[in-house]
Amino acid sequence: MPPAPAAPPASASALLAAVVDYAGLFPPAALDMAAAVAEYAASLAGPDAWMLGRFVVMAEQLPALTRERRRLEGAAPRWQVSAIVRDGSEADVAAVEAFNGEPDLGPLAMVDAIECRPRLIDGIDWIADRVPAACETYVEVGLAEDLPAWMSRIVARGLRAKIRTGGVVAEAFPSPASIVEFLSAAINAGVPFKATAGLHHAVRGAYRLTYADEAPTSMMYGYLNILFATAALESGAPASVAERWLVADDVSSITFDQDAVRWGGTEFSLSLLNRTRRQWMAGFGSCSFREPAGELQEILHGTLSARR
């Protein structure tokens, strides 16, 4: 029997437990339902399962998820599912209700989070009025919006925010300043948030935009960049410092210890890491789980190289 995998350092657990919402159905992976379900089940049974969060699916695809999940009836634990509800779609809301109302499916999977991108600010009220109160609901906010107004409405309705940090074209990646503006607006309003898109990798670098062999490359943010920019703002640092963390790429100077993470000459304490995750960044969506989990393992073992 192979030895049990070593437990991650306490600082890694504080910062990265259940941080990756698996979105294998979405580009650039764009797996079919059967393949995505198999990949998620394998990841839940793997050594890095402690980093894995929810399974992300379009609400309209929930019937397909129901069929595939029932085929894995013996797989434990119960899956947590995040359903993307289209703005104004009563059919999507009904699909969530039907999924959660299946009596034999309850022990296997449950939608306990909703994600929605309203076209207008009043769409926040629409989604708030229609989703179950027990669901965490994430409102995707465009960075061109009036962020204080959107955050004020989100907090008034007891919801959470979502930021898109990339995509499959270079133009989809927002500037560091616009990301920090979102992070600051969320923290100032007391709004927890999640991130999505373009965060397959741990640290900022030049990566292929898709999995195609001839895909162009672009500078992409790493999930650690977003987390540490958030931690910097939580600690009271100015926006300029948070922006520097968004573009940091020196992976050789990152150390996860039992009491802190140290990146270069800066120490992020265990208590700060816990606050960053508990109060602010709930996690991030990624169409790959193996990449973010694998790169963390490389950092822990000192084998990850910078991609400048």
Image (tube, rainbow, N blue to C red):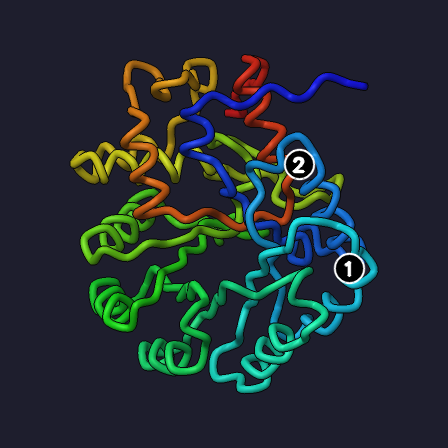
Tell me what residue is drawn at x 35 percent, y 61 percent: 160
How packed mark 2 is, by other alpha carbons closer than 10 Å (few <14, some 14-19, many 20 or more), is some
Question: Which residue is more in the foreground, 67 or 36?
Answer: 67
Q: Locate residue 137 relative to residue 201 in the image: left or right.
A: left
Residue 222 makes an appearance in the image = no
Q: Locate residue 4 relative to residue 301 in the image: left or right.
A: right
> Judging from the image, what secondary structure is the residue with disc 1 in?
loop
Q: Position of residue 254 (x, y in %)?
A: 42, 18
Question: Which residue is more in the foreground, 100 or 83?
Answer: 100
> Amino acid under label 2?
Arg
Tell me what residue is drawn at x 28 percent, y 19 percent: 266
How packed mark 1 is, by other alpha carbons closer than 10 Å (few <14, some 14-19, many 20 or more), is few
Where does label 1 land, which residue?
32
Residue 79 makes an appearance in the image = yes
The disc at residue 275 is: none
Q: Position of residue 183 (x, y in %)?
A: 29, 49
Pointer 2 and pointer 1: residues touching (CB < 8 Å)? no
Relative to 193, residue 261 above or below: above
> Judging from the image, what secondary structure is the residue with disc 2 in?
helix
Residues under labels 2 and 1: Cα distance? 17 Å
Tell me what residue is drawn at x 35 percent, y 19 percent: 259
Tell me what residue is drawn at x 49 percent, y 53 percent: 172
Relative to 225, residue 210 above or below: below
Where does label 2 land, which residue?
290
> Amino acid under label 1?
Asp
Q: Position of residue 219 (x, y in %)?
A: 49, 37
Quadrant position of residue 45: top right
Q: Position of residue 177 (x, y in %)?
A: 29, 45
Question: Which residue is more in the foreground, 168 or 66?
Answer: 66
Instruction: For the N terminus, give its image quadrant.
Output: top right
